[in-house]
Every structure is written in structure tokens, then in C-alpha cells.
Image (tube, rainbow, N blue to C red):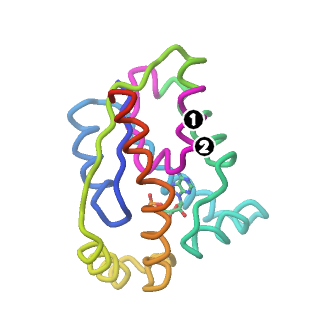
Amino acid sequence: MLIVFIGPPGAGKGTQCRRLVDLLDIPHLSTGEMLRAVMEQDTALSRYVASYINAGKLAPDHLVMRIVSQKVKSPDCTNGALFDGFPRTMVQAQMLDDLLVELKRPLDVVLELQVPDEVLIDRLLKRAKIDGRADDNDATIRERLRVFHDQTKPLVQYYSKQGK
Ligand code: AMP
């Protein structure tokens, strides 16, 4: 089963995805976690990725797609996968569609988690104090929400049209 999970930052995608993967026995592919793992190294690539994430911007589509397509083609994903925080742009959604056509594995379902912005800002500021994530500060949180409404939210209509 291939599932896409869409939701704004701080909606609780990670938490809900962990519950779902336990039930469905498929891997949880969080592009945010994959990108943070890249950032932990000390390379030109890690500094390049950090320059986007720490500013609340989206990492470049081609880079994200390269990481995801390697994973999806790996034996771990034979039974499917739950995409958490991916795709986040129309370009990524179209690239994912092309990849899944190539692999002859259609997307089964798209889930959207909705939370009002005021609740998200409050939660993310609280998380900032606990986790110390560099991208959880007031300016970056507002930028991530702006990016979500501008670039990711349109995917809901895109997938609705596909009947997902
Ligand atoms: P998340 O852990 O899902 O909140 O992601 C944290 C950050 O990683 C986001 O604010 C983006 O900067 C970056 N990121 C995660 N997933 C993607 C994606 N699919 N495309 C581009 N950037 C992403």
C-alpha cells in the first residue's frame, strides 16, 4: 500500500504516521527526517540542505526526489510505504506520479491532516523549547506555514481530482 500524508508543519504527521505504520506494517518515509540525517554530516551537501531547512524553505525538488526514489526502489518498500511530508510541491507530486507509473505501482490513498494556523504556531513554539530544532523559531515557523499554504496545500486538489 502506498500512502501520501499531507499536513502543515506541527500538525502531528509524524505521530499519526508512526501509528499507521504499526498497523499497516509498511515503512515510514519522512523526507524531513531523511534531510535532517543528511544535515548531520559535515559535507558540502549537508551545508547546502541546511541553508534551505534552517531558513524554513523547501529543499530543492530534484534533491528530495533523488532521495525518495532510491528508497522507494529498495527492498524495504516492497509492501508499500507511507510518505510523510512528501510530496510538498506540484513538481514533486508530478515526479512521484511519473516514478510510480515507471514502477507500475499506483498510489492508493492520500490523507490530509487539518489544523488551524494559530494552534500550529503555538505547538511549534512549544516544540522549539523541548527539541531545540533549528527550524522551530518564530520567523521560520511563519515561513514554513506560508510555504505550506502556497506550495503544498494545492496538492489536496490535485489528488482529489485523481480520486485519491
Ligand atoms: P518536516 O520534518 O516534515 O517538518 O520537514 C522539515 C523541513 O525539511 C521542511 O521545513 C523542509 O525544509 C524540509 N523538507 C521536508 N520534506 C520536504 C520535501 N518533500 N520537499 C522539500 N523540503 C522538504
Between residue 54 and residue 156, name the one nearer to us: 156
With 60 as the anchor, is 82 left or right in this view?
Answer: left
Q: Is residue 116 above or below residue 4?
A: below
At horizontal 57% and vertical 35% (from top left) the residue drawn is: 94
Q: Residue 125, labelled with which disc?
A: none
Where does the image place residue 73, in percent across and percent down from the top left?
A: 57, 25
Give the spatial CA distance, label 2 vs label 1. Answer: 5 Å
Residue 91 magenta-drawn? Answer: yes
- The amino acid type found where label 1 is placed reads Gln
> Label 2: which residue?
91
> Label 1: which residue?
94
At horizontal 74% and vertical 60% (from top left) the residue drawn is: 45
Q: Quadrant of residue 37?
A: bottom right
Q: Quadrant of residue 142?
A: bottom left
At horizontal 33% and vertical 76% (from top left) the residue drawn is: 124
Q: Residues within 10 Å of mark 2 (few under 14, many from 20)?
A: some
Where does the image place residue 139, in percent across and percent down from the top left?
A: 48, 84
Q: Is residue 62 above or below residue 52?
A: above
- The amino acid type found where label 2 is placed reads Val
Callout 1: CB less than 8 Å from ligand 1: no
Between residue 70 and residue 13, name the one nearer to us: 13
In which quadrant will I find the C terminus? top left
Under circle 1, the secondary element is helix
Q: How many marks?
A: 2
Q: Determine whether label 2 and label 1 are within 8 Å by CB.
A: yes
With 44 as the anchor, is 85 left or right in this view?
Answer: left
Magenta residues (range): 77-98
In which quadrant will I find the N terminus? top left
With 122 as the anchor, is 142 left or right in this view?
Answer: right
Where does the image place residue 107, in percent across and percent down from the top left?
A: 41, 26
